[in-house]
Image (cartoon, grey):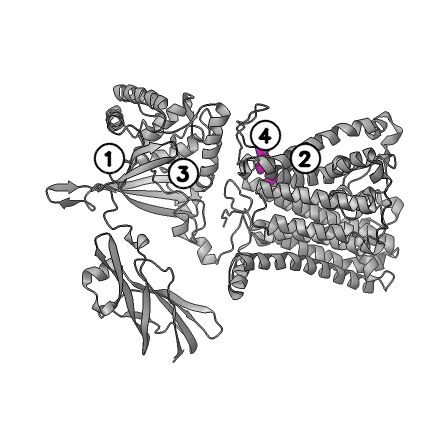
Amino acid sequence: MATPTAAHGFGQRYDLPLPLSLYLFGAAAAVVVSFIIVGLFVHGGQSRSGLDRRFDLARYALGRLILHPAIGMAPKLVALVIFAVTVAAGFVGNQDPYRNLAPTMVWVIFWVGLAYVSAFTGDIWALVNPWRTIFAVVEHTSKRLANRPRLQYPEEAGIWPACLLLLVFSWIELVYPSPAVPRHIAWLAAAYGLLTWTGMALFGSETWLQRGEVFTLVFGTFARFAPTEISRCKGVCALRPFGAGMLAHGPVSPSMTAFVLLLLSTVLYDGVLGTPQWAAAEGAAVDLLGGGEGIALAVRSVGLVGLWLFFLTGFVGVAAVMSRLADGISSAREMAGHLALTLVPIVIGYHLAHYLLLLLVQGQYLMPLISDPFGFGWNLFGTAGYRVDIAIVGARCAWYTAVTAILLGHIFAVGLAHLDVMRMLPERRTALRAEAPLTALMVVYTCLSLSIIAEPIVERRAANEAASAAVVVPADALIPEPGTGSLAAVGPGKQTRLKLTYRLLGGAFHDGTKMSAADLLYAYMFAWRWSGPGEAYDPAVAAATAPLRRALRGLRLAGTDTTAKSFRVGDFKVTRELFILDVYLALPPDDPEQQAAVAPPWSTVPWHVLALMEEAVLRDWAAFSEAEAQRRHVEWLDLGRSPALNAKLLGLVEEFAASGWRPAALHDLLSPEEARARWTALAAFFKEHGHFLVTNGPYRLESWSPDSALLAAFRDLGYPLGVGSFDAYAIPRRGWVTGVARDDDRLDLTADIETVTRFGRDYRLERQPVQSLAPDELRRAAPECRYVIFDGAGQAVLAGTARPAEDRRFTIDIGGKLPEGRYTLAAEIAVAANVMNAEIRRYEFAVP
């Protein structure tokens, strides 16, 4: 069964046509079969592999043109300008990551996009590296720096500096709490620049680039897979088969082996962090170590380093086994060095599987950001209004792309490893015997990669849970249409994961009109209409409503009840209409209380106020968001502070009242007469209060200034939540378990709770036994005992809640529910659903 999660955000759910286990088996079998085929038909020898062939472009005009220094100047300058703008945007621009160029440019375009360009085109970073360009310019213009003697770089250091910097960069990406804050990115870029220039000044530009500049090594490693080989200093410009760069060198250093394994493990770790298994393990570790944000960061940091060391140890161990099977012809260190680069196709495959969707969706933000890189409301190139399509790639495409990328990466790695081993071990039988452990390791990598990448798409449940998870969406359920918001029938044959039934108490709005179904449904219509495509669009609305639009699969007004919630106060009858609305969501039914917040059927303002705001925006009088207002050079929509806008709105309201106008999407829900009554009431409200901010509840906007607002509190008998409804939040009360007694097959608990005594605007909390409370006080306090029972191994075996019995005791029935053994009860008393600062009572007992 499928369930969407927060991992890089699919726009929709996707049910795998086959169980995940079959995909894992098929992928593992494909890797094994590829090993068999390669072993049977590829007999080794450099001349027969085909990967040594080169097509020398330098002999032709095109190759000489590519190598010409003037041709490389343009991309260098472009990269330098992008670098400068990105850093400047980080320092002085808007600090909202979605309105600042720096986060998208660094984490999406640079880290993800440039990796793909390097792997499938060539090593462009070696040409456009801005730190290299700046240092070259300074070195060229400064004789003192150019003639400065360089230190001898220690050979034993290898590329360990770059390896350490990659670990730090990965920590910032995966563990650091604020990697997308623009100013943090700018400071990190500046600090890394100083470090890089210091290394170049001490050891020489080329030496540090090849040993310590982490991005040169990362993108250079990816570029070994590319079909081009370009080196201006060597005068090389050639075409070659994909992957040929992996076999063009002898064994790499131990530090390079560690570097490749770090690349592989960090991409996998990003996927691991999104799995429920990691969440459970991390939570347990944090709790064990005392909790806190610092502990959580430490746990994630240990996980990052631990996964790298685990992969490195596993790979070196397999290399040692291969060396033994090869009769010691090659040592374990040499074997690992020869085969390390053959893992790069796996890194590329998993990089594609995990980050391609991020690039295609998040990368679209580059379009508006190039016109407004600082988030100041500019529109330099006319693209600031570009609408990001979060559904550009569906979950089905994402899944099959991931499977294909991972599988091809492993198959390619098997082929490259075979060729490398055949070159080391000319005797074919020995080579095939030595390759078997590496093939087994790649099968493990394949299954692990697919399992991790599938976590956002599939959810493992017991068979009986999975069978009950499908919920049929009624054919007459409604769903808004993108761009218009009009409600359309879902149609037959639709299923989803979760159905929530909302029972909403309706009331009166401040302009005297009564809540109707149109008010509940129009909020959904608004979300779809203003999220595009179409004339009506606002990026802020689209971003704010994206979780709702991803999850919602249907709405159905099941009925209304105007009698059950009506009551009389003196001669005044208050009618609270009860709306019953079914909401169908593509969410797992794990925690309905949390999921109820995804698509709740209520709005803070009635439909006619929403429609009035929409018409103001469509007429270019104002904009919903501050960013859109700046971009379009109009007012930021305000229903009270702008006299000029209020005058226009009043004229519009009077026009709508005369014609009985209502939005096209509401024609089936409202008559012209009902609409006319709404507009008439709104006009009267404005003339009395001087603003259009109509909502409901006991607070009403009374007066305002440019930087403040005054709310008037009043008693609204038509408001569903009456006097004292929020006291439980303003005055949270505690409870205590005062005694636990065993009575055969049950546990009886006694308790005290806090009661509230009021005098004027003050109050006093008093602790009283539950047995002494008056019936009305007991009903208002609604105390309950929440408990968990643990066995001797510390595993939770029974949990639940208990309410006061007639004798005011809380009884927990354990008869027949627990096998023989020792147990510990942990219990707390919740008062009016408050468990803040609760005291937990523990009680040990044995069965029998």
Residue 758 visible in the snapshot: yes
Residue 414 visible in the snapshot: no
Q: In the rendered structure, which segment of residues is drawn in magenta?
A: 358-365
Residue type (three-letter) at the residue carrying disc 1: Lys
**Residue at figure coordinates x 86%, y 55% from the top left:** 424
Drawn side of residue 562 relative to residue 316, left or right: left
> Does 733 appear above or below 133?
below
Disc 1 to disc 2, how far (Cα)?
A: 57 Å
Disc 3 to disc 1, how far (Cα)?
A: 34 Å
The residue carrying pointer 4 sits among few (fewer than 14), some (14 to 19) or many (20 or more) residues within 10 Å by Cα, namely some
In the rendered image, the quadrant that contains the C terminus is bottom left
In this figure, which residue is indicated by the disc labeled 4? 367
Q: Can you give x and y, in whole percent of width and height, for residue 150 in the image? A: 85, 46
Residue 760 or residue 264, whichever sits in front: 760
Q: Does the magenta stretch include residue 363?
A: yes
Identify the mark at residue 514; answer none if there is no mark: 1
Q: Can you give x and y, in whole percent of width and height, for residue 471 in the image? A: 41, 47
| Marked residue nearer the N-terminal end (3 or 1) | 3
Identify the mark at residue 492; answer none if there is no mark: 3
